[in-house]
Image (cartoon, rainbow, N blue to C red):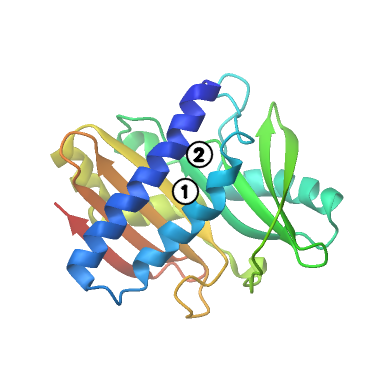
Amino acid sequence: MSRLEWILGIVLLVLLAVVVGLALSLWLGPSTQMARLGSDDVALAAPYVDDVAPTREATAVQTAKSAYITAEKAAKAWQPDAVLVNATATWPQGVQAADLKAGQETWGFIFFSPTSGTTAVVSLTNGVPSVSPRDNQRQFDLLDVTSWQLDSSDAVIKFLDNGGDAFIQREGITVYSMTLSLNDPDDNGRIEWLMTLLSTQNGHSLTMKVDAASGEVLEVLDAS
């Protein structure tokens, strides 16, 4: 994946959040909390688009947990108290179920340092992490990362088994993204995966929230 394709992937994630947020507001009403997860994390990631640009040729795809091991070491070297805020990946357009099952992609991680009040994005190229710090105007009350049990591969299987596979077969060309959030998006004390498939042909979407500790499917929205 070229730098341009990576940036376009982030842009697609923003578009996904907009589409999903609109669908959720229509389906669940304006008081829904589910839409906040995508919009909050995309808004947080937006300033880092130019900093996160690994290439598929140079970066081996990994599951989120595998990539996190290296990313955390780099984050701790940046700030010893750095803690994970979220992790995000977007798969190329036209992804099929077989491509998703391994849960492997290039991941971008955002970390927060409470003492310095700064955030940083960590990306990996050729297995070597790069850290891009940014000033931060926001404080986070983050959940303990040790509660994160469900790797991206396990979360994807939950997604496919609960409508994702059928959505791909029905809609054809789709874009898939997933975000792990530790900032308690629904104020329920859960670390959550938010996963979305978007049809590029008609704007149909499938969105799912999964508890990243227990694997419980929390919510499914098929906006077709």
Mark linked to residue 153: 1
Residue 106 position by quadrant: top right
Q: What element carries label 1?
A: helix
Q: Position of residue 139 (x, y in %)?
A: 66, 69
Q: Residue at left 60%, top 33%?
A: 50
Residue highlighted by disc 2: 104
**Between 191 and 132, the one nearer to me in the picture:** 132
Tell me the amino acid under the disc marked 2.
Answer: Gln
Rendered location of residue 191, percent (x, y):
52, 68
* Number of marks present in the image shown: 2
**Residue 140, image x, y percentages:** 64, 69
The correct choice, above or below, for 221 with respect to 8 in the image is: below
SS of the residue under disc 2: loop
Q: Which amino acid does label 1 sit on?
A: Ser
Mark toward the start of the polypeptide (1 vs 2): 2
Residue 1 visible? The answer is: no
Determine the image quadrant of residue 52. top right
Residue furthest out toward the bottom: 188
Residue at 50% x, 31% y is: 7
Where residue 110 sits: x, y (%)? 64, 52
Q: Which of 126 and 80 is in front in this view?
A: 80
Which residue sits at x=69%, y=58%?
136
In the rendered view, tell whether residue 141 sits above or below residue 83. Answer: below
Query: Which residue lies at the image location 28% right of the left edge and 51% below the top edge?
Result: 19
Q: How crowded is mark 2: few (under 14 residues within 10 Å), some or many (20 or more)?
A: many
